[in-house]
Image (spheres, helix red, strand yellow):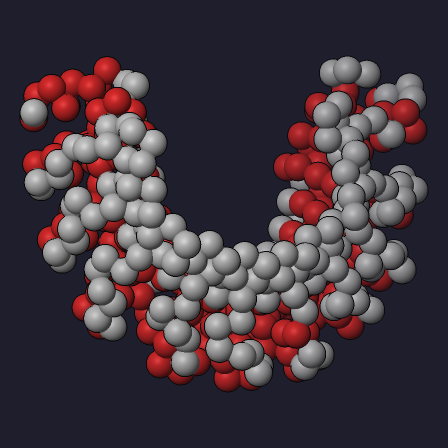
Amino acid sequence: MAMAMPELCQLAQQGDLPKIRALLASSPCPDRLLDTRHRKSGDSVLHYAARHGHLSVLRYLCEECGLSPETGNVDGKRPLHEAAQAGQTECVRYLISRSIQINVLKRADWTPIMLACTKTNLTVVQLLRDAGADLTIRNKDGWNCFHVACREGDVDILSYLLDCDGTLWESVSTNGRTPLHTASLHGCVGATQVLLQRCNYAPDTPDSCGSTPLMDAVRADNIDLAQLLVKQHGADVQKLDTMGRQPLHLAAQAGCIQAVRYLLTEHGIPVDTPAPGSGLTALHFAAKEGQTDAVKLLVRFGSNVNIKDDKGRTALHMASGGQHAECVRVLLTSGAVDGTDRSGNTAEQLARKKTVKDIFRQIN
């Protein structure tokens, strides 16, 4: 039995129907053989056949062997989930013809049409919709299939879903994120254009953290998308999130060089604009995360390497405390002077790693 299961799964994955027939015919207990599963995933031979698009195997297992297409694995994933996620059009079409459940959730998280929207196969999405797929079902994160499609950015699928239900764009996730946030974060320019043309999003709609679609775009270092949101949607390049960070701060923090340059040159954002409530500048944010290239760029744009935040910390304190040796080197060679913050700590005292301590000794 232990040897038969891997062999049967492999044959189903390969679509070798003659060998499957022969293996079952030679088994003294073919029913038990068919009922075996992958030890960890719980996948049945139906899952393998559906995932890899072997329609003849799928039909044989259902019609001649009597296996139920409603069979689930340990995650509750059924053959229809597999076929939809893999974009196996004919397998999806066949499984639908078996009058199976269309809106079943995999571990309360994904329906087949949600999984279909992770790909670019419009036909599969249409088949599922025509079979009764509910476009408004939300998973545990509050996403419906439209959110998923916005992450992938297929404009044909997005347009089709909006044609089916023009209110899908209004949904928000459990953390307040709209489909526009999702498309922006994943750099989907075409999808964003569709959303701006067909949906009525207010500029700078914030999520629960105060993050706007523009902030997501600059964190993805996608300048084309940022320009689209600013020029066509009126996004505010100095909007603040709940922590007082504006897009420049977020771009520097993420090390997004193109976005930093775009905001400084195209919109004239002062390079040392402080975040309200903390006094942190873009240089502080970049240094804290060890974004050496961003630190270099900000210095070239005239950032004051010795500017202090509300706690008396400089970027050197941030880089040293984060044990970012190369950032410490760049700051010191750019004129950073060590001093105490309001807690009495010098940047050198915050260095714990030998590599960081050595740089202070080498340069000082």
Q: Nearer the viewer, residue 232 or 288?
A: 288
Q: Find residue 139 and report its image quarter.
A: bottom right
Q: Nearer the viewer, residue 348 or 180?
A: 348
Q: Is residue 278 visible?
A: yes
Coordinates of residue 329 in the picture (x, y in percent): 14, 32
Q: Residue at x 73, y 31 (%)?
A: 41
Compared across the picture, whether 125 is left or right of 76 comes to: left
Q: Which quadrant does the N terminus fall into?
A: top right
Q: Find residue 311 and report its image quarter.
A: top left
Q: Is residue 132 above or below residue 311?
A: below
Coordinates of residue 314 in the picture (x, y in percent): 24, 41
Q: Residue at x 77, y 20 (%)?
A: 4
Q: Which quadrant does the C terminus fall into?
A: top left
Coordinates of residue 320 in the picture (x, y in percent): 26, 30
Q: Residue at x 79, y 66 (%)?
A: 133
Q: Is residue 218 visible?
A: no
